[in-house]
Image (tube, rainbow, N blue to C red):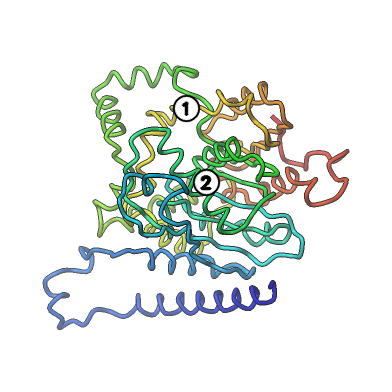
Amino acid sequence: MRRAASSAATTTRMAAAEEVRQASASASVPTPAGSRWARVWPSALRWIPTSTDRIIAAEKRLLSILKTGYVQEQVNIGSAPPGSTVRWFRSSSDEPRFINTVTFDSKENAPTLVMVHGYGASQGFFFRNFDTLASRFRVIAIDQLGWGGSSRPDFTCKSTEETEAWFIDSFEEWRKAKNLSNFILLGHSFGGYVAAKYALKHPEHVQHLILVGSAGFSSETDHSSEWLTKFRATWKGMLVNHLWESNFTPQRIVRGLDPWGPDLVRRYTTARFGTRSTGELLTDNESSLLTDYIYHTLAAKASGELCLKYIFSLGAFARKPLLQSASDWKVPTTFIYGQDDWMNYKGAQQAREDMKVPCEIIRVPQGGHFVFIDNPEGFHSAIFYACRKFLSAGAEEGLSLPDGLISA
């Protein structure tokens, strides 16, 4: 089975490399000067199309820089959870939904690590981590329902409960389809919120929970912000709050600015992972491939992104904070934060006080909210330490925190 997967993965890498070559070649071919299109519509104003196929193609180009083989698949999760009277939710369509999944080559009997991305992201954001993590784990990364290369059903949830179920139930149907159990579950930011909520509902399947810069641990009432209160009282604050409650998402700006959307994304990528990065800068090739990937994932049909106002209030405060469920925690947990992460690790410290399971909090230097991109080496070190009992028999006792990492 692993040999067949390796062969398929080699084919995937070769195909991706060919797509990169063709994409570069096609980009250099000018539109014929005599074409009617070129005469009436300058290239700078042309709409840049996107689709699921284009997202998958951009994903392949991004992952072509990896050395580890992988298999990409669309996992059928059906049209609704068993027994549900709605179809992801309120849609009358019986059309099956799919979760875009990549599984990396691994050693026999390696522990399974499932990786879940955050808001506004997709699994390709972990591109700097796959090679190293796949050397010790069986790594599986997904695009959540409504994100990346997964299906994008109409988002018709009307409450926080329905919105949480959208992500938790679709992940559970994916788990069943993949026949997985006893895995390590890693979630970043909003993906950490989903991973934690999933582990609360289905703890029997999760061996260990890793929450990276996790959102959702505190509510606005838990952490009243004088600055936020004053801001909301201004006309700008009232406007921003109105847009938030109207579910105006950042992705709508990218779509609305097309054909300038790709340049906006390029500026963001260059700033966030370049001039404003606190850690290891992206190479020119990484930046170009990541920009292309981010653009296509953001510009596609709005779906999962519309969860925002139902899960969080303005300021990224959870409407149903995880802190309130800390005493119900049943899965050992490791929190990982970049030292410069805008997500406050003190919420995790508060949760730990009420948890009845082992809990560690690790801060990684030279890293912000995307610590796995900013400081991949430090991030990998934190992951290996968090999973030491699964990677080496008897390693849990007496192993000290690796140099550079900070215990909080």
Across and down, in percent, residue 196 comes to: 57, 37
* Relative vertical location of residue 364 with respect to residue 33 in this rendering, above or below: above
Residue 138, compared with residue 303, is above or below; it is: below
Crowdedness near tag 2: few (<14), some (14–19) or many (≥20) residues, C-alpha within 10 Å: some
> Which amino acid type corresponds to the residue marked 1 in the rendered image?
Lys
Point out the frontmost of discs 2 and 1. 1
Residue at 42%, 53% (x, y): give it: 147
In-image side of 234 versus 81 (left or right): left
Q: Name the residue carrying label 1.
A: 320
Q: Secondary structure at mark 2?
A: loop
Of the 4 image quadrants, the one containing the C terminus is: top right
Q: Position of residue 319 (x, y in %)?
A: 43, 27
Q: Quadrant of residue 236?
A: top left
User: Residue 40 in the image: x percent, y percent?
Assistant: 11, 71
Label 1 crowd (10 A; few <14 / some 14-19 / many >=20): some
Mark 1 secondary-structure assignment = loop
Q: As drawn, is 263 to the left or to the right of 291?
A: left
Check if mark 2's residue and mark 1's residue have beta carbons within 8 Å: no
Give the residue number, with chain letter if any, for mark 2: 277
Mark 2 or mark 1, earlier in chain:
2
* Residue at point 58%, 26% (across, down): 325
